[in-house]
Image (tube, grey):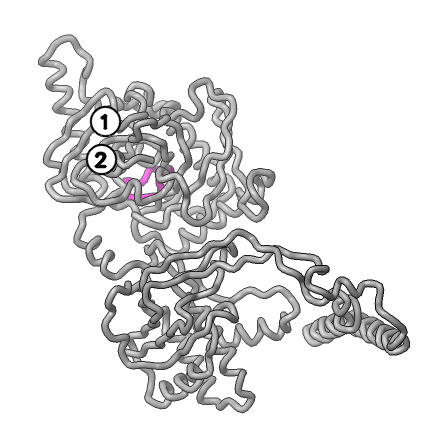
Amino acid sequence: MLALEVRLLAGRYAATQFNDRRKAEWPPHPARVYSALVAALYDDPEHGQDERDALEWLAAAGPPDVIASEASRRNQPETYVPTNDASALTGIDRHLMKVREAESALERADAKSQKKARAKLDKALEGLRKVSVKSAEASGKGTPSNAAAVLPQGRSRQPRFFPVAIPDNPLVHLCWADPPTASTAVALDRVAARVVRLGHSSSLVSVRVVEEPGDLGDRVRWIPDEEGEKILRVPTEGQLQRLDEEHARHQQVEARVLPARFMGYADAKSRALEAETPHSYFATANWVVFEVVESEGSRRRLLDVSLAQHVARALRGTLMSAGGEEWPSVLTGHAAGGEPLTGAHLAFVPLAHVGHEHASGTILGVALVPPQHLDVDARDALSRAIGIAEAQGDPSRGPSGNPNALRLTMGRHGTVLLRRVRGLPSPQALQPERWTRPSKRWASATAIALDRNPGNLRSREPDVVERAVAQAEESVRRACTNIGLPSPVAVWVHARSLLTGAPAARRFMPFPSRGNGPKRVCVHAELVFDEPVAGPVILGAGRFFGVGLCAPISAARRGR
């Protein structure tokens, strides 16, 4: 094993999240640590080839395990700070910057654009010459009119963010299972010893190479896992060359992007426990969640959860139109010949405010719930379809920089605007943990569409009702085993949900609302397993189209 030991000398880590500059990054991303090593490499102009080879080995070694403690975050609102010397930026320094930019553009120019780039450089050089002459002539002739702008209180102010993570333990380890050669480890340690900061310049660190991370103590071991809910940036083979190329492009004067691969990470201990917990073939993480921005024209209450199948089908239609023929069957739910898939595929699951004392029963958002182990090509196809749909969406909803809202049309049920959530959603109903926490007892939040007609559940004859109830309960049991769960030890079907705010089962009928297929009987249910099972528990014929979602009862009672 090889481990990089990063010690936060000030007990704090100042770095912004890659997708939200208002929030602190934690734990440190491996790609950021790698970039700090590359910067340290070039701090020594006489660095040897062995050090370059060591960094190239590290990039090709694969994503490391990350060992770090929990951390509190100081997420400050934007702070307005004075800019640099205004007079200097309007004088020689500004023209020097233009010259540097033009020189960089000339170096990158191809044969066709060489002439244009050369002309731009000549113009920048002439501007520098003129301002230099003017500055020399004005020397000693009095105080410039904008002298007040030189003082901090006179400068214009720009918004800046300084989020900080304060870990319980200042020690972080990045670990690779396969160790390098002894000479590579020595060269890597020399580079690591030159690293003085990670993230912001105030985030001082010492870095060294060790063989083992030692006792974990209160720290968590995060392991690479495509299904993991924590997303970190990691280096990949050829990272050093890509960083060199990126530096040659921006030359510290243009916008830059850290080249990296996004990798899911999971808590090793929790993952081990989850592996022993029964779960369905639906993924517990990597959901894509959309929040409701606005709804219009519904004849019922504002996006009542009984409209779940209409919202689900509208979102599916929008994304399928954007995905075109590129969507694989695991996303469409249909085989190449058009017949429905019998196994797991993408589910469109409206998430409602239910189970709370004051629950409204309204849809707060929609989750795209993939099957377990969705392959990379399918993930990419889904991401492309979402990107295309958002590019065609409504840009006027929400703060600048947020994804465009998708406008879904549901015929007589009106329209709804959905916007993809970045980061952790604030309502609990939009968080996957609300629906996936292991539990022995579950209750339906949206009615379950039974795979078979159980008979007349509303008959006046007790014997008929008794047989129909038994058939319905057996259908729910089979629905559990159909998605990979064990058969529950007890099932009770009801006309109404145990969860406050959820509409009666009859409000979800007919299901499906259109088409010539059989119309399913919808029921609510309470399920008890002999051991905790992990969600999501989505049951019945409508599990891919918005109905049949269950919630762990204890989690539901904790509220929204």
Main secondary structure type of the part rendered in magenta: loop
SS under mark 1: loop
The residue at 51%/21% (across/down) is: 297
Disc on res. 498: 1
Front position in the image: 537 or 10: 10
Residue 340 magenta-highlighted: yes
The residue at 44%/40% (across/down) is: 290
| Percent position of residue 46, x then y | 54, 91
| Percent position of residue 276, x then y | 17, 53
| Percent position of residue 41, x then y | 50, 83
Find disc 2 in the rendering and name its residue. Answer: 553
Residue sticking out furthest to the top? 460
The residue at 38%/29% (across/down) is: 308
Q: Is residue 265 left or right of residue 275?
A: right
Looking at the figure, which quarter contains the C terminus? top left
The amino acid at mark 2 is: Ile
SS under mark 2: helix
**Residue 115 seen in the current view:** no
Whether label 1 touches label 2, CB < 8 Å = yes
Vertical order, 395 against 161 (above or below): above
Front position in the image: 283 or 289: 289
Which image quarter: residue 517?
A: top left
The amino acid at mark 1 is: Leu
Front position in the image: 364 or 201: 201
**Residue 474 seen in the current view:** yes
| Percent position of residue 556, x then y | 27, 35
Vertical order, 17 against 333 (above or below): below
Looking at the figure, which quarter contains the N terminus? bottom left
Q: Give the range drawn in magenta.
A: 338-348
